Structure formats: structure tokens, C-alpha cells
Image (cartoon, rainbow, N blue to C red):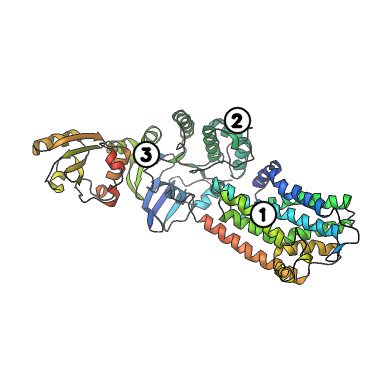
């Protein structure tokens, strides 16, 4: 029998830090997830999502910081059946049928879900008796989800569950997930796709460079992601000057071309044209998620209303160029 | 040990026929071929040729089963299965113990098959206790190989498993005097071979048939290799456990 979880405690991460050689993959992450929350962990590749999840699950130890799942260290919580996971790049064990795999995972939990509930909830009943290593990609992901929920966990962690799926398969998968979250379970899922967070999460956490750069209700985070990028050719103006334009929170310059990141594209453009008659070749583009992440990183996130000017190493990926070209 | 995992692993072992090729079919074919021309008066290391080759081949088959049994961990690591089990709360030592037990169980059919052929077609007549003792001595003598298999399972990539197994198995068999009797080796090579565990595993089986036991020297060699390779396996396990799933992903 499982002892009753503490009412208030869900997931608690404090001061989590993890380095791999010279790279700080997770850099002081604090996070509390209440029971019943459905949380999306967003971020570009290399943001530290998978490392955070690995530490949270007790798969790798942090260099510093603590993890508590329902008040317990991860290993204890896992042993007590509190946690189910669909890990990245996971395949299925060969030689067993879907049903046998489900029964195996049930057998490892002290308080599993009934088999038929697992099969029904994950929509795997139709191929329960087929060898799991011979299923299609979409079916495989559903089986992996079935294995994640078989132990009747309080918390399900999904690390980019839809990464290799086509659109239809992805939709099917989230429909399955939706049924599960409707039961008041706690879910944390990492994803690249903002629309997935939008559709399924109550709360979104943005990570970049190992740090949490935004955390809040999905709608709010989405609004902050609704940034515009204004680009113009404008010689001889200082970055500080341009950073004072309304809405602008970051300025960047390459030769005579300045790039302004703004929360209000219309006002910024009006002010730009009003103040600088020589501004030309103006382009306004919606900032992609990648842009938003970069905007929310480091200096920008710490002081969103001032204009940090010198290009930082992180500001030079080629994706930056793609925005207006 | 977790019985749910054990039951599932037994099912998988039964369905995995490929292991039987190296653990049973190949050693049986070698036994048939290598013992075909031997006369009743030919002896090797104090035994008739047939029981001598029989034990060598039984050891060879069991060695293959133990070697691959541990090595399969590499394949399960590569699909993230070991991590999945850890999240499900299964302690690592439970998993390793189950894998070792299964590897030993898959070693038994080949051993029985070779012994059975010896009894039925090669005039090897032993009482029941000697058969059992000889088989058990071989299996115990192969403990270092079981540890080696687990070390490889935690250290190797799944893709390198096939070549590692092919080369490793052939080397262990050759240097252990399983394919070619040590008695025909030059002196210096025979001395070297007696430092290796596979030689002593087969020797342990033959010693039982000859009415003796493996002796202190063999016991010490086997025990030393078991300790060293088990430590290597533990190190490889620890290293794997502390490592993220795939290099480059964060």
C-alpha cells in the first residue's frame, strides 16, 4: 500500500545545477509544480529541458540543488510508484507483446491501474497482443505512454513525446493525453512546439541556457512570446538611443542594420519613423519561438526594459538571420 | 529479485532463438566433428577424447550464452529500457541479477544437448551425480565470463555488440583451449592459457569426470577473474548510471 501523499507537495526543484564538462546544462533552476497541474516545459535545443527532466526523475544526480517529488527524493518516489515517464529517444523492449509490456510495468508498481484501463486510456487495446517491437511509430508512442501510466503514477513526465510524429499522429497522441490530464493528474511535458503547450498545458515554463526565463499561465507566456522584430537600415545611432523607443527591449546592430525586439511593433515603428527620417528598408516580422527564447535569455530577461547592446555569443546563431530574409 | 521482470525475461529468452545457435547448435556441431575420428584408446589430458571434447564444447556453448546474455544489456540501454525500469522504481542490482540468472538459464540447454549427445552417441557413461557435478562445475567456472558480459553490456554500444561478441567469443574459446586442446599447444602458450578463466572452467568439468576437482590453482584463477571482472562490471554500471541518455541532448 502506498502512503498518502502530502496534500501540498508536488514537484519541488530547488537550486538545481548540472554541468557537463565546460557546459552548464542546468543553471540554478527553482520550480514548484502543484499536484494536478499540467505544465509544458518549453525551450530550444540545448536549453536544459532533458537534463532537468533526467535529474527530476533521479536518472542523473545534480551537481547542486535538491529534488522532491511528493516530499520524497526521486528514487523513493519512483519506487513508491509516484512517477511514470516517457523518455526521449526511447524504444520498446523486443520480444514482448504490448500487453506483456503493460503487465510488466504494472508489476513493478505497488498500486497499478487495472490493465483494461491502461489499454483503453492509451488506445492500445487493438494491438495488445502484437509484438511491441513491430508496431508503427505512432503506435509505439502510444504503447510508451501506456507504460508511463500503467503504474498509476501521480506524475507523468513526457520528454518531447511527439518529436518524430506526423501531424495526424501528434493530434491523436494529444487526444489521448487530454483524457489523462482530465483526471486531475500532474503532467510535465517538454516540447519544441508552442501550440502543444497552448492546447494542453495550464502553465508554461520557458527554459534557455539552463535557466528558467519565463514561467506562468500559458496565455501569459504566449503573450510574451508574441514579440515583433523590427529591422531597419539606420546609420549612426547608438543602441541606447534606439533602446529608448517605445516597446523595445533589445537592440542589435550589424553595420548599419539595426534589429529591434519589441513588445509592440506598431508603436515602435511609428516612433522610429517619427524620430529618424533616414530610417529605411523597414521590416516587421513576428518573432518565432526561437526569437522569443533568445529575447528572454540572459540580460534581456533580467532587465527587460533596457537595451543591452553588445552582441553576446548566444546572439549569433544563423537562425537569427532567417527572421527577415 | 523482482518476479514480474523475471517472468517477462523468461518469455523473451524462450522467444529468442538466435541465442541457441551459439549456445547450443554450434557447440554440438563442433562436438560431433571433433570427436568423430577418435578411437577408444586416444586420450587427452588423462581423459578419453570424447568426454574431453564434450566438456570443452559444453563450456564453449555455455560461455556464449553468458557472454551474450550480459551483452544484451547494451541493446536495452540503447532503446532507453534500463532508464525506463529505473523510473519504474526497479533497483539496478535487481535488473543485473535478473539478467545474470537468465543468461545462466540460457546456458543450460546447450550444455544438456552436448552432454546428451556424448551419452547417447559417444559412449560417455557417467553416473547422475557426476553429470550434474561436471555441468555445475563448468557453469560456476564461467562466472568471470558472466561478469564480463555484464561489463560489456554497460560499456559497449549496441552496434558494436556483434563484432565484440564474435571476436571475444573466438578469442576466449581459442585461448581457453576449448577449440584446440591445450595439450597440443607449445609450452609457453599452455602456460599463458592457464592464467585464463575459460581454460579452468572446462578443466573443472573434466576434473569431475576424472574423479577429482579443479584444484586450488584453478579455483584461485577463477575467483580472481570473477572479482576483477565483477569490479569492471560495477564500474561500467556506475558510469552508465551517471551519464545522460545521449551525448549532445540536454
- Are tags 1 and 2 found on a single chain? no
- Residue A19 drawn at (x, y percent): 40, 57
Name the residue beneath numbered marker 2: A127
Q: Is residue B3 above or below residue A129?
A: below
Percent from the top left, x then y, of residue B133? 82, 59
Q: Nearer the viewer, mark 3 or mark 1?
A: 1
Residue at position x 71%, y 53% from top?
A: B104
Q: Residue at x 64, y 53 (%)?
A: B165
Question: Which one is in front, A112 or B163?
Answer: B163
Cβ atoms at labels 1 and 2 below 8 Å apart? no
Specify which label sits upstream in the sequence, 3 or 2: 2
Task: Name the subunit of mark 2.
Answer: A
**Residue at (90%, 54%) from the top-left corner?**
B123
Could you say whether the residue bearing mark 1 is in a helix, strand or loop?
helix
Is residue B26 rendered to the left or right of residue A23?
right
Q: Is residue B45 left or right of residue A252?
A: right
The quarter holding residue A279 reads: top left
Q: Please state, as top left, top right, bottom left or bottom right, where the N terminus of chain A lies in the image.
A: top right
Report the Cα–Cα distance between label 3 and label 2. Answer: 34 Å
B67 shown above or below A7: below
For mark 3, give the secondary structure. Answer: strand
Judged by depth in the image, the label closer to the viewer, 3 or 2, is 2
Tell me how far mark 3 sits from mark 1, CA to CA. 49 Å
Q: Nearer the viewer, residue A118 or A27?
A: A27
| Cα–Cα gap, marks 1 and 2 | 34 Å
Q: Which residue is mark 3?
A: A203
Task: Answer whether labels 3 and 1 touch (C-beta < 8 Å).
Answer: no
Q: Determine the chain carrying the residue at label 1.
A: B
Q: Disc 1 marks which residue?
A: B67
Answer with the quarter of the image where residue B207 lies: bottom right
Amino acid at each position: 500500500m502506498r502512503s498518502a501523499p502530502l496534500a501540498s507537495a508536488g514537484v519541488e526543484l530547488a537550486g538545481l545545477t548540472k554541468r557537463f564538462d565546460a557546459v552548464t546544462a542546468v543553471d540554478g533552476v527553482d520550480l514548484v509544480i502543484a499536484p494536478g497541474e499540467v505544465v509544458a516545459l518549453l525551450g530550444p535545443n540545448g536549453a536544459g529541458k532533458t537534463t532537468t527532466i533526467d535529474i527530476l526523475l533521479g536518472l542523473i544526480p545534480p551537481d547542486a540543488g535538491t529534488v522532491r517529488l511528493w516530499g520524497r527524493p526521486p528514487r523513493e518516489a519512483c519506487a513508491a510508484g509516484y512517477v511514470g515517464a516517457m523518455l526521449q529517444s526511447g524504444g520498446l523492449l523486443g520480444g514482448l507483446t504490448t500487453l506483456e509490456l503493460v503487465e510488466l510495468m504494472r508489476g513493478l508498481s505497488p498500486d497499478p491501474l487495472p490493465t483494461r484501463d491502461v489499454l483503453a486510456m492509451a488506445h492500445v487495446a487493438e494491438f495488445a497482443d502484437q509484438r511491441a517491437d513491430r508496431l508503427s511509430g505512432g503506435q509505439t508512442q502510444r504503447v510508451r505512454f501506456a507504460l508511463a501510466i500503467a503504474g498509476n503514477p501521480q506524475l507523468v513526465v513526457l520528454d518531447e513525446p511527439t518529436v518524430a510524429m506526423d501531424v495526424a499522429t501528434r493530434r491523436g497522441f494529444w487526444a489521448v493525453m487530454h483524457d489523462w490530464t482530465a483526471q486531475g493528474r500532474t503532467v510535465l511535458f517538454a516540447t519544441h512546439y508552442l501550440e502543444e503547450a497552448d492546447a494542453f498545458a495550464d502553465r508554461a515554463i520557458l527554459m534557455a541556457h539552463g535557466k528558467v526565463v519565463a514561467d506562468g499561465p500559458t496565455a501569459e507566456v504566449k503573450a510574451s512570446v508574441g514579440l515583433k522584430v523590427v529591422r531597419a537600415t539606420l546609420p549612426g545611432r547608438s543602441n541606447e538611443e534606439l533602446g529608448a523607443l517605445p516597446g523595445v527591449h533589445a537592440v542589435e546592430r550589424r553595420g548599419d542594420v539595426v534589429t529591434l525586439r519589441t513588445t509592440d511593433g506598431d508603436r515602435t515603428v511609428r516612433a522610429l519613423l517619427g524620430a529618424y527620417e533616414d530610417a529605411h528598408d523597414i521590416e516587421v516580422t513576428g518573432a518565432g519561438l526561437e526569437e522569443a527564447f533568445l529575447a528572454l535569455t540572459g540580460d534581456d530577461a533580467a532587465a527587460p526594459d533596457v537595451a543591452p547592446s553588445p552582441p553576446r555569443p548566444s546572439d549569433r546563431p544563423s537562425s537569427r538571420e532567417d527572421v527577415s530574409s | 529479485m523482482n518476479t514480474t521482470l523475471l517472468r517477462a525475461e523468461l518469455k523473451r529468452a524462450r522467444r529468442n532463438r538466435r541465442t541457441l545457435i551459439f549456445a547450443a547448435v554450434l557447440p554440438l556441431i563442433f562436438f560431433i566433428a571433433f570427436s568423430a575420428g577418435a578411437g577408444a584408446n586416444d586420450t587427452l589430458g588423462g581423459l578419453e577424447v570424447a568426454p574431453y571434447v564434450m566438456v570443452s564444447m559444453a563450456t564453449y556453448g555455455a560461455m556464449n550464452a553468458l557472454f551474450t546474455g550480459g551483452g544484451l544489456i547494451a541493446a536495452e540501454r540503447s532503446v532507453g529500457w534500463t532508464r525506463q525500469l529505473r523510473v519504474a522504481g526497479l533497483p539496478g542490482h535487481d535488473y543485473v541479477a535478473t539478467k545474470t540468472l537468465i543468461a545462466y538459464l540460457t546456458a543450460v540447454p546447450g550444455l544438456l544437448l552436448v552432454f546428451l549427445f556424448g551419452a547417447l552417441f559417444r559412449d560417455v557413461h557417467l553416473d547422475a551425480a557426476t553429470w550434474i557435478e561436471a555441468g555445475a562445475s563448468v557453469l560456476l567456472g564461467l562466472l568471470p565470463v558472466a561478469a564480463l558480459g555484464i561489463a560489456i553490456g554497460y560499456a559497449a554500444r549496441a552496434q558494436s555488440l556483434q563484432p565484440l561478441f564474435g571476436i571475444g567469443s573466438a578469442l576466449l574459446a581459442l585461448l581457453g583451449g576449448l577449440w584446440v586442446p591445450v595439450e597440443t599447444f607449445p609450452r609457453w602458450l599452455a602456460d599463458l592459457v592457464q592464467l585464463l578463466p575459460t581454460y579452468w572452467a572446462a578443466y573443472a568439468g573434466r576434473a569431475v569426470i576424472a574423479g577429482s576437482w579443479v584444484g586450488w590453482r584453478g579455483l584461485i584463477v577463477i575467483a580472481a577473474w570473477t572479482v576483477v571482472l565483477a569490479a569492471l562490471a560495477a564500474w561500467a554500471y556506475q558510469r552508465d548510471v551517471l551519464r545522460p541518455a545521449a551525448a549532445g541532448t540536454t
